[in-house]
Image (cartoon, rainbow, N blue to C red):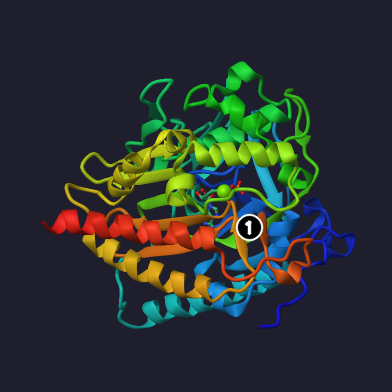
Protein backbone atom coordinates (compact mmCIF):
# COMPACT_ATOMS: atom_id res chain seq x y z
CA UNK A 1 0.00 0.00 0.00
CA UNK A 2 1.32 3.43 -0.87
CA UNK A 3 1.76 5.85 2.01
CA UNK A 4 2.47 9.54 1.91
CA UNK A 5 6.16 10.18 2.46
CA UNK A 6 6.67 10.35 6.21
CA UNK A 7 9.95 12.18 5.86
CA UNK A 8 9.09 15.89 5.87
CA UNK A 9 9.88 17.48 9.18
CA UNK A 10 6.75 18.63 11.02
CA UNK A 11 8.32 21.64 12.62
CA UNK A 12 9.51 23.29 9.42
CA UNK A 13 8.90 27.04 9.31
CA UNK A 14 6.53 26.80 6.31
CA UNK A 15 4.06 24.99 8.56
CA UNK A 16 4.12 27.83 11.04
CA UNK A 17 0.96 29.70 11.79
CA UNK A 18 1.01 33.17 13.35
CA UNK A 19 1.76 33.38 17.04
CA UNK A 20 -1.31 32.37 19.08
CA UNK A 21 -1.51 35.85 20.54
CA UNK A 22 -2.12 37.46 17.16
CA UNK A 23 -5.10 35.50 15.82
CA UNK A 24 -8.83 36.12 16.11
CA UNK A 25 -9.39 32.34 16.21
CA UNK A 26 -7.41 31.92 19.38
CA UNK A 27 -8.86 29.43 21.86
CA UNK A 28 -8.15 28.55 25.46
CA UNK A 29 -7.09 25.01 26.41
CA UNK A 30 -7.43 22.98 29.59
CA UNK A 31 -5.38 20.36 31.39
CA UNK A 32 -6.42 16.80 30.47
CA UNK A 33 -7.33 15.15 33.77
CA UNK A 34 -7.63 11.52 32.61
CA UNK A 35 -3.97 11.05 31.67
CA UNK A 36 -2.78 7.84 33.34
CA UNK A 37 0.79 7.62 32.01
CA UNK A 38 3.37 9.21 29.73
CA UNK A 39 6.06 11.80 30.15
CA UNK A 40 4.51 15.13 29.30
CA UNK A 41 1.34 16.88 30.38
CA UNK A 42 -1.46 16.57 27.83
CA UNK A 43 -4.03 19.33 27.35
CA UNK A 44 -7.53 19.51 25.82
CA UNK A 45 -8.46 21.67 22.85
CA UNK A 46 -12.11 20.77 23.42
CA UNK A 47 -14.00 17.77 24.75
CA UNK A 48 -13.07 15.64 21.74
CA UNK A 49 -9.41 16.57 21.11
CA UNK A 50 -6.32 16.17 23.27
CA UNK A 51 -2.97 17.81 22.49
CA UNK A 52 0.31 15.99 22.96
CA UNK A 53 3.71 17.70 22.69
CA UNK A 54 4.95 17.04 19.17
CA UNK A 55 7.64 14.45 18.62
CA UNK A 56 8.88 14.46 15.02
CA UNK A 57 8.84 10.71 14.52
CA UNK A 58 5.37 10.40 15.97
CA UNK A 59 4.15 13.19 13.70
CA UNK A 60 5.66 11.47 10.69
CA UNK A 61 3.98 8.26 11.75
CA UNK A 62 0.54 9.90 11.87
CA UNK A 63 1.15 11.46 8.46
CA UNK A 64 1.97 8.10 6.93
CA UNK A 65 -0.60 5.80 8.52
CA UNK A 66 -2.02 3.19 6.13
CA UNK A 67 -5.78 3.04 5.87
CA UNK A 68 -6.09 -0.32 7.61
CA UNK A 69 -4.45 1.04 10.79
CA UNK A 70 -6.68 4.08 11.12
CA UNK A 71 -9.46 2.35 13.03
CA UNK A 72 -7.09 1.17 15.75
CA UNK A 73 -5.15 4.37 16.46
CA UNK A 74 -6.42 7.81 17.57
CA UNK A 75 -7.68 10.11 14.84
CA UNK A 76 -5.11 12.76 13.88
CA UNK A 77 -6.38 16.34 13.51
CA UNK A 78 -3.19 18.22 12.65
CA UNK A 79 -0.78 20.29 14.70
CA UNK A 80 -1.00 23.50 16.61
CA UNK A 81 1.17 25.88 18.57
CA UNK A 82 0.26 26.43 22.19
CA UNK A 83 1.62 29.02 24.55
CA UNK A 84 1.05 29.55 28.23
CA UNK A 85 0.85 32.62 30.35
CA UNK A 86 0.61 33.05 34.06
CA UNK A 87 -1.37 35.92 35.50
CA UNK A 88 -0.58 37.73 38.72
CA UNK A 89 -2.89 35.43 40.71
CA UNK A 90 -1.00 32.34 39.59
CA UNK A 91 -3.56 31.11 37.05
CA UNK A 92 -1.85 29.52 34.08
CA UNK A 93 -3.73 29.99 30.82
CA UNK A 94 -2.98 27.89 27.75
CA UNK A 95 -3.80 29.40 24.36
CA UNK A 96 -3.45 28.40 20.74
CA UNK A 97 -4.70 28.86 17.19
CA UNK A 98 -6.39 25.70 15.94
CA UNK A 99 -5.72 24.74 12.30
CA UNK A 100 -8.24 25.97 9.67
CA UNK A 101 -9.65 22.46 9.12
CA UNK A 102 -10.53 22.28 12.80
CA UNK A 103 -12.25 25.67 12.70
CA UNK A 104 -14.30 24.62 9.65
CA UNK A 105 -15.35 21.41 11.38
CA UNK A 106 -16.34 23.35 14.50
CA UNK A 107 -18.46 25.73 12.42
CA UNK A 108 -20.20 22.77 10.78
CA UNK A 109 -20.82 21.19 14.19
CA UNK A 110 -22.22 24.45 15.58
CA UNK A 111 -24.55 24.82 12.61
CA UNK A 112 -25.85 21.27 13.08
CA UNK A 113 -26.46 21.75 16.80
CA UNK A 114 -28.20 25.04 16.07
CA UNK A 115 -30.52 23.30 13.62
CA UNK A 116 -31.18 20.56 16.19
CA UNK A 117 -31.94 23.15 18.84
CA UNK A 118 -34.36 25.04 16.62
CA UNK A 119 -36.04 21.72 15.66
CA UNK A 120 -36.60 21.08 19.33
CA UNK A 121 -37.99 24.53 19.97
CA UNK A 122 -40.29 24.29 16.94
CA UNK A 123 -41.68 20.82 17.60
CA UNK A 124 -41.72 18.06 20.18
CA UNK A 125 -38.31 17.56 21.78
CA UNK A 126 -37.18 14.03 20.96
CA UNK A 127 -34.77 13.93 23.88
CA UNK A 128 -35.65 16.07 26.85
CA UNK A 129 -32.38 15.52 28.74
CA UNK A 130 -30.03 18.44 28.14
CA UNK A 131 -26.54 17.43 27.02
CA UNK A 132 -24.30 17.63 30.09
CA UNK A 133 -21.46 20.05 29.71
CA UNK A 134 -18.30 18.24 30.82
CA UNK A 135 -16.48 19.66 33.83
CA UNK A 136 -13.82 22.28 33.17
CA UNK A 137 -10.40 22.63 34.77
CA UNK A 138 -7.60 25.12 35.02
CA UNK A 139 -4.07 25.27 36.32
CA UNK A 140 -3.11 27.35 39.30
CA UNK A 141 0.25 27.79 40.96
CA UNK A 142 -0.25 28.00 44.72
CA UNK A 143 2.23 26.43 47.16
CA UNK A 144 2.48 23.77 44.51
CA UNK A 145 0.70 23.41 41.18
CA UNK A 146 -2.98 22.51 41.37
CA UNK A 147 -5.63 21.61 38.85
CA UNK A 148 -8.86 23.26 39.86
CA UNK A 149 -12.38 22.75 38.62
CA UNK A 150 -13.39 25.85 36.70
CA UNK A 151 -16.64 27.15 35.37
CA UNK A 152 -18.17 25.84 32.20
CA UNK A 153 -18.73 28.57 29.68
CA UNK A 154 -22.48 28.41 30.32
CA UNK A 155 -22.04 28.78 34.02
CA UNK A 156 -20.40 32.10 34.54
CA UNK A 157 -23.17 33.44 36.71
CA UNK A 158 -22.09 30.96 39.38
CA UNK A 159 -18.70 32.59 39.86
CA UNK A 160 -17.71 33.41 43.40
CA UNK A 161 -15.38 36.32 44.02
CA UNK A 162 -12.28 34.22 43.34
CA UNK A 163 -13.65 33.08 39.99
CA UNK A 164 -14.23 29.49 41.04
CA UNK A 165 -17.33 27.45 41.60
CA UNK A 166 -15.59 25.35 44.21
CA UNK A 167 -12.24 25.96 45.77
CA UNK A 168 -11.13 22.37 46.22
CA UNK A 169 -8.29 21.20 44.07
CA UNK A 170 -8.24 17.64 42.76
CA UNK A 171 -9.12 15.47 45.70
CA UNK A 172 -6.51 12.79 45.39
CA UNK A 173 -5.27 11.08 48.49
CA UNK A 174 -2.29 8.80 48.20
CA UNK A 175 -2.30 5.65 50.31
CA UNK A 176 1.23 6.35 51.48
CA UNK A 177 4.50 7.62 50.04
CA UNK A 178 5.66 4.20 48.89
CA UNK A 179 2.34 3.34 47.33
CA UNK A 180 1.44 3.83 43.72
CA UNK A 181 -2.14 2.80 44.22
CA UNK A 182 -4.26 5.87 44.80
CA UNK A 183 -7.90 6.42 45.54
CA UNK A 184 -9.14 9.65 44.03
CA UNK A 185 -11.93 12.14 43.94
CA UNK A 186 -15.23 11.94 45.74
CA UNK A 187 -16.96 14.22 43.27
CA UNK A 188 -16.60 13.47 39.60
CA UNK A 189 -16.08 17.15 38.79
CA UNK A 190 -13.06 17.32 41.05
CA UNK A 191 -11.32 14.21 39.74
CA UNK A 192 -7.85 14.51 38.34
CA UNK A 193 -5.59 11.53 37.82
CA UNK A 194 -2.53 12.05 40.07
CA UNK A 195 -0.27 11.22 37.14
CA UNK A 196 -1.70 14.10 35.08
CA UNK A 197 -1.02 16.46 37.97
CA UNK A 198 2.47 15.04 38.42
CA UNK A 199 3.26 15.58 34.72
CA UNK A 200 2.22 19.23 34.94
CA UNK A 201 4.20 19.73 38.16
CA UNK A 202 7.31 18.01 36.83
CA UNK A 203 7.16 20.09 33.72
CA UNK A 204 7.08 23.34 35.64
CA UNK A 205 9.75 22.06 37.99
CA UNK A 206 11.99 21.31 35.04
CA UNK A 207 11.51 24.86 33.83
CA UNK A 208 12.34 26.23 37.27
CA UNK A 209 8.82 27.48 37.96
CA UNK A 210 8.28 25.14 40.89
CA UNK A 211 10.95 24.32 43.45
CA UNK A 212 11.47 20.63 44.24
CA UNK A 213 9.82 20.99 47.63
CA UNK A 214 6.76 22.53 45.98
CA UNK A 215 6.29 19.72 43.53
CA UNK A 216 6.13 16.79 45.94
CA UNK A 217 5.20 13.75 43.92
CA UNK A 218 1.76 12.52 44.94
CA UNK A 219 3.05 9.00 44.30
CA UNK A 220 6.26 9.08 46.31
CA UNK A 221 9.93 9.58 45.46
CA UNK A 222 9.69 8.09 42.00
CA UNK A 223 8.91 11.50 40.57
CA UNK A 224 12.54 12.52 40.49
CA UNK A 225 13.40 9.51 38.42
CA UNK A 226 10.64 10.44 36.04
CA UNK A 227 11.85 14.00 35.62
CA UNK A 228 15.37 12.95 34.82
CA UNK A 229 14.19 10.15 32.57
CA UNK A 230 16.05 10.04 29.30
CA UNK A 231 12.80 9.56 27.41
CA UNK A 232 11.94 13.18 28.03
CA UNK A 233 14.66 14.25 25.65
CA UNK A 234 12.82 12.60 22.75
CA UNK A 235 10.37 15.46 22.68
CA UNK A 236 12.72 18.10 23.95
CA UNK A 237 12.15 20.25 20.88
CA UNK A 238 8.63 20.84 22.06
CA UNK A 239 8.78 20.15 25.73
CA UNK A 240 9.76 23.53 27.07
CA UNK A 241 6.11 24.40 27.02
CA UNK A 242 4.05 26.42 29.38
CA UNK A 243 5.46 29.07 31.60
CA UNK A 244 8.92 30.15 30.65
CA UNK A 245 9.67 32.74 33.26
CA UNK A 246 10.51 32.44 36.93
CA UNK A 247 7.78 32.68 39.49
CA UNK A 248 6.97 36.28 40.07
CA UNK A 249 3.95 38.44 40.67
CA UNK A 250 4.11 39.69 37.09
CA UNK A 251 2.20 38.24 34.17
CA UNK A 252 4.47 35.97 32.14
CA UNK A 253 4.24 34.17 28.82
CA UNK A 254 5.99 31.15 27.28
CA UNK A 255 7.24 30.61 23.75
CA UNK A 256 4.64 28.83 21.61
CA UNK A 257 5.30 25.10 21.29
CA UNK A 258 4.04 22.60 18.73
CA UNK A 259 1.50 19.93 19.69
CA UNK A 260 -0.19 17.04 17.90
CA UNK A 261 -4.00 17.18 17.94
CA UNK A 262 -5.40 13.73 18.63
CA UNK A 263 -8.86 12.28 19.05
CA UNK A 264 -9.69 12.21 22.75
CA UNK A 265 -10.35 8.53 23.38
CA UNK A 266 -12.24 9.05 26.63
CA UNK A 267 -14.51 11.93 25.66
CA UNK A 268 -17.56 9.66 25.28
CA UNK A 269 -17.45 8.43 28.85
CA UNK A 270 -18.85 9.88 32.04
CA UNK A 271 -16.60 7.72 34.23
CA UNK A 272 -13.56 6.92 32.08
CA UNK A 273 -11.71 3.73 32.98
CA UNK A 274 -8.29 3.76 31.31
CA UNK A 275 -5.54 1.15 31.05
CA UNK A 276 -2.20 1.94 29.40
CA UNK A 277 -0.34 -1.31 28.66
CA UNK A 278 3.05 -0.94 27.04
CA UNK A 279 3.17 -3.70 24.46
CA UNK A 280 6.06 -5.68 22.99
CA UNK A 281 9.23 -7.20 24.33
CA UNK A 282 11.60 -4.55 23.00
CA UNK A 283 11.46 -0.93 24.14
CA UNK A 284 14.15 0.82 22.11
CA UNK A 285 14.54 2.06 18.55
CA UNK A 286 17.30 0.93 16.18
CA UNK A 287 19.30 4.16 16.40
CA UNK A 288 19.53 4.27 20.19
CA UNK A 289 22.88 4.54 22.03
CA UNK A 290 24.44 1.34 23.45
CA UNK A 291 23.98 2.60 27.00
CA UNK A 292 20.30 3.37 26.54
CA UNK A 293 19.75 0.06 24.81
CA UNK A 294 21.25 -1.75 27.82
CA UNK A 295 19.02 0.18 30.22
CA UNK A 296 15.90 -0.60 28.19
CA UNK A 297 16.83 -4.29 27.98
CA UNK A 298 17.35 -4.40 31.75
CA UNK A 299 14.02 -2.68 32.37
CA UNK A 300 12.24 -5.18 30.14
CA UNK A 301 14.01 -8.11 31.80
CA UNK A 302 13.01 -6.92 35.26
CA UNK A 303 9.36 -6.57 34.38
CA UNK A 304 6.50 -8.33 32.65
CA UNK A 305 7.66 -6.86 29.31
CA UNK A 306 10.01 -9.79 28.84
CA UNK A 307 7.69 -12.53 30.11
CA UNK A 308 4.36 -11.33 28.70
CA UNK A 309 5.21 -8.57 26.22
CA UNK A 310 2.98 -6.34 28.37
CA UNK A 311 3.73 -3.82 31.12
CA UNK A 312 1.33 -1.64 33.04
CA UNK A 313 2.15 2.04 32.47
CA UNK A 314 -0.92 3.56 34.09
CA UNK A 315 -4.49 2.82 35.03
CA UNK A 316 -7.62 4.34 36.50
CA UNK A 317 -10.79 2.43 37.23
CA UNK A 318 -14.07 3.79 38.54
CA UNK A 319 -15.50 2.07 41.60
CA UNK A 320 -19.25 2.64 41.65
CA UNK A 321 -19.62 1.66 45.31
CA UNK A 322 -17.88 4.75 46.63
CA UNK A 323 -17.83 6.90 43.49
CA UNK A 324 -14.01 6.96 43.45
CA UNK A 325 -11.26 6.03 41.05
CA UNK A 326 -8.49 3.60 41.90
CA UNK A 327 -5.30 4.67 40.12
CA UNK A 328 -1.97 2.96 39.48
CA UNK A 329 1.12 4.38 37.84
CA UNK A 330 4.06 2.98 35.89
CA UNK A 331 6.22 2.49 39.00
CA UNK A 332 3.58 0.16 40.36
CA UNK A 333 3.54 -1.54 36.94
CA UNK A 334 7.27 -2.22 37.14
CA UNK A 335 6.89 -4.06 40.45
CA UNK A 336 4.36 -6.55 39.09
CA UNK A 337 5.10 -10.16 38.24
CA UNK A 338 2.92 -12.08 35.78
CA UNK A 339 0.31 -12.94 38.39
CA UNK A 340 0.29 -9.37 39.69
CA UNK A 341 -0.33 -7.99 36.21
CA UNK A 342 -3.17 -10.46 35.63
CA UNK A 343 -4.81 -9.48 38.94
CA UNK A 344 -4.44 -5.79 38.11
CA UNK A 345 -6.07 -6.28 34.70
CA UNK A 346 -8.88 -8.09 36.49
CA UNK A 347 -9.19 -5.18 38.92
CA UNK A 348 -9.44 -2.85 35.93
CA UNK A 349 -12.51 -4.76 34.77
CA UNK A 350 -14.44 -4.51 38.05
CA UNK A 351 -16.61 -1.46 38.77
CA UNK A 352 -18.92 -3.04 41.30
CA UNK A 353 -18.68 -6.57 42.68
CA UNK A 354 -17.97 -8.60 39.56
CA UNK A 355 -15.98 -8.51 36.34
CA UNK A 356 -17.70 -6.57 33.52
CA UNK A 357 -18.29 -9.49 31.18
CA UNK A 358 -19.83 -7.20 28.53
CA UNK A 359 -16.51 -5.34 28.43
CA UNK A 360 -14.39 -8.52 28.45
CA UNK A 361 -16.31 -10.01 25.51
CA UNK A 362 -16.09 -6.90 23.38
CA UNK A 363 -12.44 -6.41 24.25
CA UNK A 364 -11.70 -9.98 23.15
CA UNK A 365 -13.38 -9.25 19.78
CA UNK A 366 -11.44 -6.05 19.32
CA UNK A 367 -8.13 -7.73 20.19
CA UNK A 368 -8.81 -10.46 17.62
CA UNK A 369 -9.45 -7.82 15.00
CA UNK A 370 -6.29 -5.95 15.97
CA UNK A 371 -4.29 -9.19 15.77
CA UNK A 372 -5.41 -9.71 12.16
CA UNK A 373 -4.39 -6.18 11.20
CA UNK A 374 -0.97 -6.29 12.89
CA UNK A 375 -0.23 -9.74 11.44
CA UNK A 376 -0.74 -8.36 7.95
CA UNK A 377 1.49 -5.30 8.45
CA UNK A 378 4.82 -5.78 6.74
CA UNK A 379 7.85 -3.92 8.21
CA UNK A 380 6.02 -2.07 11.01
CA UNK A 381 7.61 -2.01 14.46
CA UNK A 382 5.79 -0.40 17.38
CA UNK A 383 8.66 -0.04 19.84
CA UNK A 384 7.45 1.56 23.13
CA UNK A 385 3.83 1.84 21.92
CA UNK A 386 0.94 1.06 24.25
CA UNK A 387 -2.50 -0.43 24.05
CA UNK A 388 -4.94 2.10 25.47
CA UNK A 389 -8.05 0.33 26.71
CA UNK A 390 -10.91 2.59 27.73
CA UNK A 391 -14.50 2.02 28.80
CA UNK A 392 -17.23 3.70 30.77
CA UNK A 393 -17.22 2.70 34.43
CA UNK A 394 -20.89 3.35 35.00
CA UNK A 395 -23.93 3.50 32.79
CA UNK A 396 -22.67 3.24 29.24
CA UNK A 397 -21.81 -0.03 27.57
CA UNK A 398 -18.94 1.47 25.57
CA UNK A 399 -15.39 0.26 25.16
CA UNK A 400 -12.46 1.11 22.94
CA UNK A 401 -9.06 -0.39 22.15
CA UNK A 402 -6.34 1.60 20.34
CA UNK A 403 -2.62 1.68 19.91
CA UNK A 404 -0.99 4.95 21.07
CA UNK A 405 2.49 6.46 21.30
CA UNK A 406 4.51 6.20 18.08
CA UNK A 407 7.61 8.15 19.09
CA UNK A 408 9.82 5.10 18.39
CA UNK A 409 7.84 3.38 15.65
CA UNK A 410 9.18 2.60 12.21
CA UNK A 411 8.15 1.08 8.88
CA UNK A 412 9.71 0.83 5.46
CA UNK A 413 8.53 4.26 4.25
CA UNK A 414 10.57 5.93 6.99
CA UNK A 415 13.65 4.76 5.07
CA UNK A 416 15.49 4.24 8.33
CA UNK A 417 18.90 2.53 8.28
CA UNK A 418 17.26 -0.69 9.46
CA UNK A 419 14.16 -1.88 7.60
CA UNK A 420 12.41 -4.78 9.33
CA UNK A 421 10.82 -7.77 7.64
CA UNK A 422 7.42 -9.25 8.41
CA UNK A 423 5.04 -8.25 11.20
CA UNK A 424 5.98 -7.07 14.70
CA UNK A 425 6.41 -10.37 16.57
CA UNK A 426 7.05 -8.72 19.94
CA UNK A 427 3.77 -6.84 19.61
CA UNK A 428 1.91 -10.00 18.61
CA UNK A 429 3.44 -11.86 21.57
CA UNK A 430 1.96 -9.23 23.91
CA UNK A 431 -1.37 -9.29 22.11
CA UNK A 432 -1.63 -13.08 22.34
CA UNK A 433 -0.81 -13.00 26.04
CA UNK A 434 -3.43 -10.31 26.62
CA UNK A 435 -6.00 -12.48 24.85
CA UNK A 436 -4.95 -15.40 27.09
CA UNK A 437 -5.23 -13.31 30.28
CA UNK A 438 -8.71 -12.11 29.36
CA UNK A 439 -9.81 -15.64 28.49
CA UNK A 440 -8.60 -16.77 31.93
CA UNK A 441 -10.43 -13.90 33.66
CA UNK A 442 -13.56 -14.76 31.70
CA UNK A 443 -13.35 -18.44 32.59
CA UNK A 444 -12.89 -17.66 36.28
CA UNK A 445 -15.84 -15.27 36.26
CA UNK A 446 -18.32 -17.70 34.73
CA UNK A 447 -17.50 -20.57 37.11
N1 LIG B 1 -5.64 10.05 22.14
C1 LIG B 1 -5.70 9.98 23.47
N2 LIG B 1 -6.89 10.08 24.11
C2 LIG B 1 -6.98 10.01 25.46
N3 LIG B 1 -5.90 9.84 26.26
C3 LIG B 1 -4.69 9.73 25.67
C4 LIG B 1 -4.53 9.78 24.27
N4 LIG B 1 -3.22 9.64 23.97
C5 LIG B 1 -2.60 9.51 25.15
N5 LIG B 1 -3.47 9.56 26.18
C6 LIG B 1 -3.16 9.53 27.63
O1 LIG B 1 -1.89 10.09 27.80
C7 LIG B 1 -0.96 9.15 28.34
C8 LIG B 1 0.39 9.30 27.68
O2 LIG B 1 0.28 9.14 26.28
P1 LIG B 1 1.51 8.66 25.40
O3 LIG B 1 1.13 8.89 23.98
O4 LIG B 1 1.88 7.28 25.77
O5 LIG B 1 2.63 9.68 25.84
P2 LIG B 1 4.24 9.47 26.03
O6 LIG B 1 4.82 9.53 24.66
O7 LIG B 1 4.63 10.62 26.89
O8 LIG B 1 4.44 8.12 26.71
C9 LIG B 1 -1.63 7.78 28.15
O9 LIG B 1 -1.27 6.91 29.20
C10 LIG B 1 -3.10 8.13 28.18
O10 LIG B 1 -3.58 8.17 29.51
MG1 LIG C 1 3.59 6.23 26.37
Between 75 and 23, the one nearer to me in the picture: 75
Q: Is residue 258 visible?
A: yes
Q: Secondary structure at mark 1?
A: loop
Could you say where residue 410 lies in the image, as x and y percent from the top left?
68, 62
Side of 271 relative to 292 (left or right): left
Name the residue that disc number 1 marks.
406
Quarter that holds the N terminus: bottom right
Could you say where residue 59 lies in the image, as x and y percent from the top left?
71, 61
Q: Is mark 1 within 8 Å of ligand 1?
A: no
Which residue, as the protein is rendered here, is positioned at the far top? 213
Could you say where residue 120 lies in the image, as x and y percent from the top left?
37, 78
Which of the 4 quarters of the picture holds residue 211? top right
User: Label 1: few (<14), some or many (≥20) within 10 Å?
Assistant: many
Which residue, as the protein is rendered here, is positioned at the far right? 13
The residue positioned 20% from the left and 42% from the top of the image is: 321
Which of the 4 quarters of the picture holds residue 341? top left
Which of the 4 quarters of the picture holds residue 411? bottom right
Side of 240 relative to 47 (left or right): right
Side of 446 relative to 161 (left or right): left
Q: Is residue 163 visible?
A: no
Please say if 380 is above or below 208: below
The residue positioned 72% from the left and 70% from the top of the image is: 412
Between 432 and 22, the one nearer to me in the picture: 432
Quarter that holds the C terminus: bottom left
Side of 184 relative to 384 (left or right): left
Please say if 329 is above or below 429: above
Please say if 126 is above or below 251: below
The residue positioned 13% from the left and 59% from the top of the image is: 446
* Callout count: 1
Which residue, as the protein is rendered here, is positioned at the far left? 447
Between 73 and 124, the one nearer to me in the picture: 73
Could you say where residue 284 lies in the image, as x and y percent from the top left?
65, 48
Amino acid sequence: MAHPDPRPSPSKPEDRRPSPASSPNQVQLEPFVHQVGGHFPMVCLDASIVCKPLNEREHRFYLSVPYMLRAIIPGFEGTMEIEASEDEDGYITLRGNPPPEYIQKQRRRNRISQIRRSDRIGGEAKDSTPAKDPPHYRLKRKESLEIEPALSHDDESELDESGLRRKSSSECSSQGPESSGTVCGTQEEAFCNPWALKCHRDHLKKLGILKSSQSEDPEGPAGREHTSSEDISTASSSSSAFVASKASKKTSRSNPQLYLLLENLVSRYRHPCVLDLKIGTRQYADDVSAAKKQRKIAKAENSTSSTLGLRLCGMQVYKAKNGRYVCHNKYFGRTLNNQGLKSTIEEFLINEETVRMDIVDRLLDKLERMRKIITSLESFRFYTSSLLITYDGYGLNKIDLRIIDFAHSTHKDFEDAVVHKGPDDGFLFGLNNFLGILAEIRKKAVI
